[in-house]
Image (spheres, rainbow, N blue to C red):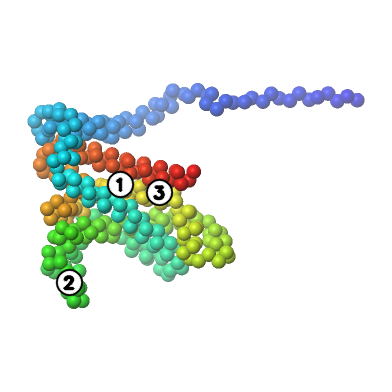
């Protein structure tokens, strides 16, 4: 007997992107877009316009084009010094706190250290303290007359600068960067500690069976497992280094001379002390471009490494 074929239901193929988007969905995005335009896009456009004017904040604005930008790079030694100090700070801020965070996180998670939670709390403690208060404390530590650091060095018979670390143009940036590292490496340690706990422990077991040393496991298992987190942390520390202000303001105010000027402090002095808002806006635009270029370069290098 011939068996009749059972008719198969027709398959309906849905083309990707063929669906129509409901225009009503855009209404739910309007509040967020309005907030973004009001508090980010519009102020950014205003800042760019002010950077092309000669304005003291009170009198009418005088449009001068790119003269502020040209003057910043030709006749402003303070700004050039601020760029140099900021770039050095960024290089150190994107490497030293990140490296310390990796090392301490690996020790806390993989080192079988007792009282791990207490160490984590101690490392994170500087994040609880206000950065201004921390800077004032470190200013007292650095004091050349009665600071504890000077007292310890005197008892040990070690020579120290008589003007102090914050009063020496050759040492002031290193002294300020120590404050920055002290306040930030605990933050990177906590981020890496959380990320390291998500790395598959079987990878460490396999590496241990293959005879891989602790350093080999750190280099071949830990580092690859934290690449995404490393990119995020480096970008965060880069932005934090570019925008450092409170440490300089609370300790040296850019001194001695201009030796500890950074871009953010230059923006503050030009905008609120000297009342040259056009210069301040131009410097802030340049700082923003630096942040975008460096951050995008880091992301590009990470994407190229992945591909």
Q: Closest to the observer: 259 or 231?
A: 259
Q: Position of residue 141 (x, y in %)?
A: 19, 65
| Residue matched to label 1 | 239
For disc 1, the neighbor class at 10 Å (few under 14, some 14 to 19, many from 20) is many
Structural distance between the alpha carbons of marks 3 and 1: 12 Å
Query: What is the number of callouts on the image?
Result: 3
| Residue matched to label 3 | 231
The answer to which image quadrant residue 14 occupies is: top right
The answer to which image quadrant residue 31 occupies is: top left
Q: Which element is circle 3 on?
A: helix
Residue at 91% in and 25% down: 1
Q: Is residue 249 visible?
A: no
Earlier in the chain: of badge 1 and badge 2, it is: 2
Q: Which element is circle 1 on?
A: helix
Residue at 26% in and 52% down: 88
Earlier in the chain: of badge 3 and badge 2, it is: 2
Q: Position of residue 18 (x, y in %)?
A: 53, 23
Q: Closest to the observer: 19 or 171?
A: 171
Q: Position of residue 214 (x, y in %)?
A: 48, 66
| Residue matched to label 2 | 159
């Amino acid at each position: 007997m011939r068996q009749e074929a059972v008719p198969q239901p027709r398959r309906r193929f849905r083309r990707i992107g063929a669906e129509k988007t409901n225009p009503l969905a855009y209404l739910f995005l309007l509040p967020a877009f309005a907030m973004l335009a009001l508090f980010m896009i519009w102020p950014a456009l205003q800042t760019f316009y002010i950077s092309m004017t000669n304005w003291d904040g009170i009198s009418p604005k005088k449009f001068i084009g790119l003269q502020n930008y040209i003057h910043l790079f030709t006749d402003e030694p303070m700004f050039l010094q601020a760029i140099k100090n900021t770039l050095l700070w960024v290089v150190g801020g994107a490497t030293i706190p990140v490296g310390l965070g990796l090392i301490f996180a690996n020790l806390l998670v993989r080192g079988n250290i007792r009282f791990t939670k207490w160490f984590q709390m101690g490392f994170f403690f500087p994040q609880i303290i206000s950065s201004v208060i921390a800077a004032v404390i470190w200013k007292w530590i650095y004091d050349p007359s009665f600071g504890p650091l000077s007292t310890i060095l005197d008892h040990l018979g070690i020579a120290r600068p008589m003007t102090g670390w914050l009063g020496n143009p050759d040492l002031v940036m290193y002294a300020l960067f120590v404050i920055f590292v002290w306040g930030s490496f605990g933050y990177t340690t906590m981020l890496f500690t959380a990320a390291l706990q998500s790395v598959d422990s079987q990878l460490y077991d396999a590496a241990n069976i293959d005879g891989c040393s602790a350093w080999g496991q750190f280099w071949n298992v830990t580092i690859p497992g934290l690449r995404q987190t490393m990119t995020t942390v480096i970008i965060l520390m880069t932005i934090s280094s570019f925008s450092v202000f409170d440490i300089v303001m609370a300790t040296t105010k850019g001194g001695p001379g201009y030796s500890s000027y950074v871009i953010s402090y230059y923006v503050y002095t030009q905008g609120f002390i000297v009342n040259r808002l056009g210069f301040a806006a131009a410097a802030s635009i340049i700082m923003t471009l630096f942040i975008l270029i460096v951050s995008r370069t880091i992301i590009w290098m990470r994407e190229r490494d992945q591909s």
